[in-house]
Amino acid sequence: MLEIQRLLVPVDFSGFSDGTVKFAAAVAANFNAEMIIFHAISEDEVEKIAESRVPRYPIDMIYADMETELATHVGKLVTPSELEGLRIRYAVSSGTAAREIVEAAKLHKVDLIVMATHGRTGLSHVLMGSIAEQVMRLAGCPVLTIKSPRA
């Protein structure tokens, strides 16, 4: 039987990952697993945020603010009763989303990645690519994709 002690849940704040957070919380509760809510921010965005303040805003403070924002976001998606008893951590890193998700999975030694997919096909898939598909190819653990009802 598959034993899941830790799962990674990438969140992009777009709404596509909202249902995935609820699903991942149910999986975490079922396995008594720790849930790591993760966000990858582009290096350009980090730089813009840092430069938007005088004096320059420290990078570690940007990450801390993003982790707080993740916790607030999750609190709006999952009811307190659904969160009760769950072990949740929040993590942020900068870089390309797929690569950062795979690296976070290695760093945190996760057993499962639970992530949203937009479900694009055809030309839009060819032009935009699929972060979920890249993660599935590169990850060293199973990846469970949840198709967004918005797709």
Image (cartoon, rainbow, N blue to C red):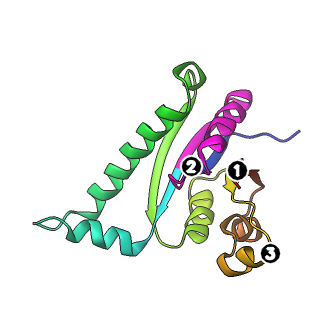
Check the picture and name the quadrant holding the N terminus: top right
Q: Quadrant of the C terminus?
A: bottom right
Considering only order in the chain, which callout, 2 or 1, is on the residue closer to the N terminus? 2
Determine whether, in the image, residue 59 is placed left or right of residue 94.
left
The Cα atoms of the two marked residues, 3 and 2, are separated by 22 Å
Q: Is residue 40 above or below residue 112?
A: below
Disc 1/disc 3 C-alpha distance (Å) = 17 Å
Proximity of marks 1 and 2: CB atoms separated by less than 8 Å: yes
Packing grade of label 3 (10 A; few <14, some 14-19, many >=20) is few
Amino acid type indicated by mark 1? Ser
Task: Determine the residue positioned at 50% across, 52% down.
Answer: 13
Decide whether residue 65 is among the magenta residues.
no
Query: Of callouts 1 and 3, which one flags the residue occurring earlier in the amino acid sequence?
Result: 3
Q: Say which mark, if any, is on residue 15.
A: 2
Res 148 label: 1
* Label 1 crowd (10 A; few <14 / some 14-19 / many >=20): some
SS at circle 2: loop
The answer to whether residue 72 is above or below residue 79 is below
User: Considering the numbered disc 3 on the image, is that residue within a helix, a strand or a loop?
Assistant: helix
Question: Closer to the N terminus: mark 3 or mark 2?
Answer: 2
> Which region shows up in magenta?
11-37
Amino acid on which the number 2 mark rests in the picture: Gly
Position of residue 54 in the picture relative to residue 130 (left or right):
left
Residue at screen point 67% across, 39% down:
24
Q: Nearer the viewer, residue 127 or 137?
A: 127
- Residue drawn at the location 50% of the way across and 56% of the way down: 39
Whole-percent x, y for residue 10 in the image: 58, 53
- Residue 117 placement: quadrant: bottom right
Left-right relation of 49 to 94: left
Task: Please name the residue that numbered disc 3 is placed on.
Answer: 122
